[in-house]
Each structure stands twice: as structure tokens, then as C-alpha cells.
Image (cartoon, coloured by chain):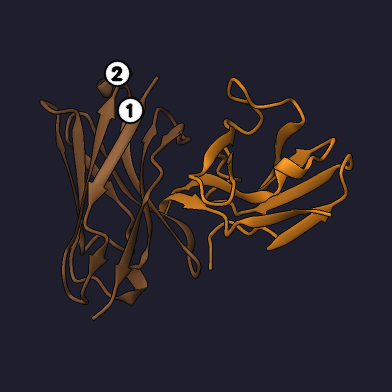
Amino acid sequence: QSVLTQPPSVSGAPGQRVTISCTGSSSNIGAPYDVHWYQQLPGTAPKLLIYGNSNRPSGVPDRFSGSKSGTSASLAITGLQAEDEADYYCQSYDTNLSVVFGGGTKLTVL
Amino acid sequence: QVHLQQWGAGLLKPSETLSLTCAVYGGSFQRYFWTWIRLSPGRGLEWIGEISHTGIPNYNPSLKSRVTISIDTSKNQFSLKLTSVTAADAAVYYCASRPRGHFDYWTQGTLVTVSS
């Protein structure tokens, strides 16, 4: 199992807001190391969505936002669109294991 | 902007050595850590290791005994070797660039199958 824990799946209707949690520990997110988020559309490579807990790379819509508190982080998606259906991964650093990822969350747009 | 292109064998037999190379185009080769990551249904995304432009590697402790990452700065390329592969090593392998804590550019990946 992954060092960072994510829900296997979340879902929401178009236009709704969904959140994806990423839970770690005092040796990674709580150390505190930054959390980053990636979106993987079917058949494509992961794409950087959020870096440094809450920063969006150029081109990422402001519907996507990230936050971090203690040993957990969250990705929020507002105004859900069909094109948001994808797998989402969180990533951080662990003092024992170096780079670590969450197990991934499949977002279904109903 | 960085563009990455990777190549290598996608079908291996158990006990063989996986070998992949990634070429870097654009950007500054010295600004990044050059990384290998894999994705499998059972393990999700897994960081394999990385190398700095000065040639200093860092490996996932769980794979360290079988992994070697090397760099050729004259060609702006870096490579992955994973020895003694088993079915558990079947995955899509990506090379990626890491400017700080995150990975900003990724390749499309190479599907590696391990079968006798």
C-alpha cells in the first residue's frame, strides 16, 4: 500500500464541487514537506496540476485548488466538467523513503 | 520548455535486465533532477530514482539493490537499468524532470511487459 492515503474513488455531477484527500504522517506531509497533485487522463502521462501545496502551473484552470494542513492535504475541483474525469495522485517527500505518492483517486463525473 | 523522449525494450523475460534511456530537449539540463517513475495497477505510481546533472543518484530503498541510473551530459540523456526483473516489475515506465519537489515534465511512457 501507498505511503500517502487517498480515497480510491470520488464522484460528482457536472457543476458540483468535489474534494480529494491525501493523508500522510509526520515523516512526510507533516514533516512538513510540500504536497503536489497530478491529473492522469485515460491513456496519457500524469500532468502536474498543483505544486507546492497550492500553486497552479500556467494553463491549469482556477477551478483546481490545493490546500494542506498538518499531515493531510486536499485537492478541490469546483464547477466539475466531464473532461475532469481522470485519476488524481498526490505526491510528497518522506524522510525515510524519499519521493512518495498516494495510491490515486479515480474521479467519475456522473 | 523541456521535452523528453524515451526508448527501450518493452518485452522482457523474467531475470532479464530492463534498460531505458531518456533524452532531454530544451530547457536547462543543469536545473533539474532527472527521474524515473513507474505506474502499475497493483502499486500505483512508484518513484524509482533520480540523478542530478552532476551524476549523483538517489534510489527508492525498495529497489536500490537492482537499480542503476546513469547520465550522459554530452548527449543530454539519462538511463535506467533494472536487473532481475519479475512480473512485479511490469508497468508503464516514465522519465520526468524534477526542478524542486514536484515533477513538471513527463514522457508518454513505455509499457514494459515481463513474460516467459
Type of the residue with mark 2: Ser
Report crowding for label 2: few under 14, some 14 to 19, many 20 or more residues within 10 A (C-alpha). Answer: few
Q: In which quarter of the image is residue A7?
A: bottom right
Badge 2 marks a residue whose secondary structure is loop
Residue A51 position, x and y percent, is 57, 31
Residue A17 position, x and y percent, is 86, 42
Viewer-nearest residue: B56 or B45: B45
Shade representing chain B: brown
Viewer-nearest residue: B68 or A12: A12
Residue at image x 58%, y 24%?
A57
Mark carried by residue B53: none
Report crowding for label 1: few under 14, some 14 to 19, many 20 or more residues within 10 A (C-alpha). Answer: some
Viewer-nearest residue: B41 or A2: B41
Mark carried by residue B32: 1
Q: Mark 2 points at which residue?
A: B28
Asked if badge 1 and badge 2 are on a common chain, one would say: yes
Residue at image x 51%, y 46%?
A44
State which quarter of the image contains the N terminus of chain B: top left
Seen in the picture, residue B24 relative to B90 is either above or below; the reply is: above
Q: Quadrant of residue B89?
A: bottom left
Residue at image x 38%, y 48%?
B109
Residue at image x 61%, y 54%?
A24
Write down the chain letter for disc 1: B
Shade representing chain A: orange
Badge 1 marks a residue whose secondary structure is loop
What number of labels is visible? 2
Seen in the picture, residue B116 relative to B70 is either above or below; the reply is: below
Task: Name the side, left or right, on which A40 lies relative to B32.
Answer: right
Residue B2 position, x and y percent, is 36, 24
Residue A101 position, x and y percent, is 52, 52
